[in-house]
Amino acid sequence: MNHPSHDVAIVGAGLVGLATAYQLQRRRPGLRIVVLDKEPEVGRHQSGHNSGVLHSGVYYAPGSLKARLCREGKAAVEAFAEEHGIPMERCGKVIVAVDDSELDRLRALHERGKANGVPGLEMIGPAGLRDIEPHIVGVAALRVGDTGIIDFSRVCRAYADEVVARGGELQLGHAVRDIADTGQRVTLVTDGGQVSARAVITCAGLYSDRFGPQGSGPKIVPFRGDYYTLTPPARALVRNLVYPVPDPSLPFLGVHFTRRIDGEVWAGPNAVLAFAREGYRRRTVRPGELLEVLAYPGFRRLARSYWRTGAAEMWRDVLRSAFLAELRRYLPELTAGHLRWGPSGVRAQALAEDGTMVDDFVMLRSERALYVRNAPSPGATASLAIGDHLAAQIESLVA
C-alpha cells in the first residue's frame, strides 16, 4: 500500500534519527515527520548496545565536528534527562598511564581537553589516583570530572515518546530498500510500501553506507566489542570510570572499566572484526556481508598496517586469561573469578579506501537528502546536537 506523504522522512529509529526528528519538531512545529526502522522497536543496535557514558569531549581533535557537537550534545542530553526524569550521574573518570612511556600522550590529551573547553581536568600522580580509585595503579592519570553515566536506551525511548507526542509518526518494522529522488519529492521504497516526503535524512548506523551517492563517502566495517561484567563483590574495586591512555592512531579507546547507572561494572571492550553487520556473537556470520568487507581495498590496507594490533585483539577475544591480563595492568587485584561474560556491541566504523579509519562525523548531502555516513562514539552523547545540526540543514527544503 502507499503511505501518505510527509514533509521529512528519517531512516533509522536510533538515538541520532529520533533526536533529529525531535529537533526538527522543536524548530518547526507542525511538520509532518515519519521515522522508519526495520526493527520492531527503537534503539535496537548501537543505541542500545553502548557503554552508557556521557563523554566530556576530551579525546577529539580541536575544531572537529566531534569536539563541538560532543560538548553541545552532552549539555543538551543532561538537560533533556533532567526534564524527563531520567537518572544520570556526573561521576567523572580517570585516564591512567600505567608506565612512563604513556606520559607524553597523557599530557597531550590534557592539552587537547583544555583546547576543547572540557571542565574538570586535572593531572594527578599515584597518590591522587589512589584517593579517587584506591585499587587502580598507574604512574599518573588525567582526572576528567565532567564525564557522566546514563541509560541511553531509556533516553532513546524518551526521544521516541516526544516525537510521537509532537505529532510525528513511527513506522517500525519497515525496512527501507531504496530511496529515489523524483524532483520535488523523495520516494522511499519500504517493506510496507512507498513513503513520499519532501526531504529525507538517513541515520542508518551499521547500514549507513547503503544510502547516499554511490561511490562517495567511507565504507562501514563492523567491529564487535565484548565486555565482561564484574561480580557483585568485585564491583567495589572500581568506584567510577577507569580508561587507558588511547593510541592516537586508532579510534578505539582500549579496554576500560565502566560503572553503569544501574550499579553494574563493565570491563572491556575488545575490538575485533564482526562477521556480520549485526554480528553480536562470534558464531554470527553473514557470508555476503563478510565477503563485502574482505573485498574492500580499504579493509585490506588497514589489515596490512595493523595486523599485529588485530592479532592481539583476536587473541584476547578467544583467551579469557589474555583479556584478564590486560585488565590487571590497571587493577592488579582482579582475578578470573571476578569476571562474568557480559554484553557485546558492534561499532559501525567508517573506513576510507586508503585504509584510514575515519574519525570525525561525516554527513553527505544531495538535493533533497542528508546522509549521516559516520556517527560513532560520541554519537550517543552528541545525539541532540547532531540532530539540531541536521535539522538546520534540512529546514530550507521544507520551508
Image: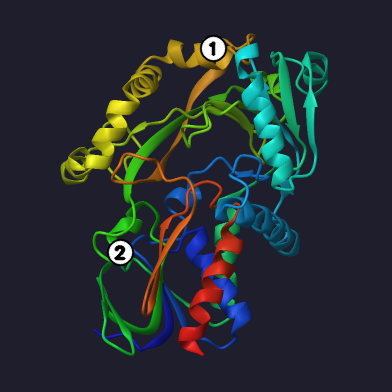
Callout 1 amino acid: Gly
Instruction: Identify the coloring.
Output: rainbow
Q: Please name the residue shown 75% across and 59% down the image.
A: 82
Q: From the viewer's perspective, tell me whether residue 323 is left or right of residue 159.
A: left
Identify the mark at residue 337; answer none if there is no mark: 1
For the N terminus, the image quarter is bottom left
Is 245 drawn above or below residue 168 in the view shown? above
**Residue 196, image quadrant:** bottom left
Q: Position of residue 156 (x, y in %)?
A: 55, 59
Q: Looking at the image, is mark 1 or mark 2 earlier in the sequence?
A: 2
Task: Find the distance from the CA under tag 1 to the CA under tag 2.
Answer: 46 Å
Q: Please name the residue shown 31% across and 40% down the image.
A: 279
The kind of secondary structure element at disc 2 is: loop
Give the labeled residue for mark 2: 211
Q: In the depicted view, which residue is nearer to us: 361 or 280? A: 361
Is 200 drawn above or below residue 122 in the view shown? below
Callout 2 amino acid: Phe
The kind of secondary structure element at disc 1 is: helix
